[in-house]
Amino acid sequence: EDKVVQSPLSLVVHEGDTVTLNCSYEVTNFRSLLWYKQEKKAPTFLFMLTSSGIEKKSGRLSSILDKKELFSILNITATQTGDSAIYLCAVGSTSGSRLTFGEGTQLTVNP
Amino acid sequence: NAGVTQTPKFRILKIGQSMTLQCTQDMNHNYMYWYRQDPGMGLKLIYYSVGAGITDKGEVPNGYNVSRSTTEDFPLRLELAAPSQTSVYFCASSPVGVADTQYFGPGTRLTVL
């Protein structure tokens, strides 16, 4: 059974701090790892990672995958209150067209 | 384009009642999914479909049924609602070839009392 574990489960920081969110996984026939941001409603797509060591970047957010150690990190620099959300990690397998999600990290950024 | 739409946004059911959650996408995506999200938890896959007429069970299918008669629509049926089905339900879709980049609807918050 595929498994995704995220840590920490919750995190409270001050504006301007840098945070690192972790995602480890066990999956048969890995295809991709994805990060989503969930504010009050539906998750929205952030990154998809398929290759080790290649950083994906979007503004203050960046992510990297280590397929040997089976984990990914999501970094957010100079955090803002608008970054407060649940960050979900998911993995896809070549065995099917479905994703397995982790429990998410609840990030709270205080002014 | 509206993307993925879901109705209703909120619903309260009594134990034993039935209902259908509607999901429609206008992006011509072949793949569609139903998830539930319990408080403080990630998303659990209920059912998914890789095209019209084809559906398959996910991690937590018990108590639910789906059908996919068209590419656009993927309704989720709850029969004999139970308090354990109190959750937020998300529908998602993705295109063939980029199946992992799923687009989510706004969700339906269901309470069973």
Image (cartoon, rainbow, N blue to C red):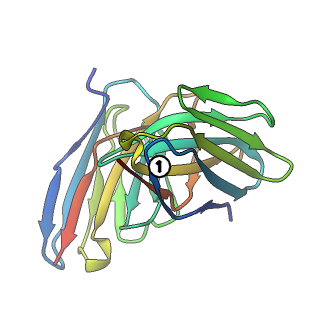
State the residue position of label 1.
B48
Q: Position of residue B113 (x, y in %)?
A: 16, 78
The quadrant in which the N terminus of chain B is found is: top left
Q: Chain of mark 1?
A: B
Q: Local crowd at mark 1 within 10 Å, few (<14), some, or many (≥20)? A: many
A11 or B45, which is in the foreground? Answer: A11
Q: Is residue B35 visible?
A: yes
Q: Position of residue A66 (x, y in %)?
A: 79, 45
Q: Position of residue A80 (x, y in %)?
A: 41, 39
**Residue type at the position of mark 1:** Tyr
Q: Is residue B102 visible?
A: no
Q: How many marks?
A: 1
Q: Residue at x 71, y 31 (%)?
A: A55
Q: Residue at x 65, y 54 (%)?
A: A23
Q: Residue at x 32, y 56 (%)?
A: B89
Q: Position of residue B24 (x, y in %)?
A: 28, 36
Position of A78 with respect to A109 (left or right) is right
Q: Residue at x 47, y 49 (%)?
A: B48
Res. A42 image quadrant: top left
B106 or A22, which is in the foreground? Answer: A22
- Which element carries disc 1, helix, strand or loop? strand
| Residue reaching furthest to the right | A68
B70 or B58, which is in the foreground? Answer: B58
A47 or B44, which is in the foreground? Answer: A47
Res. B105 image quadrant: top left
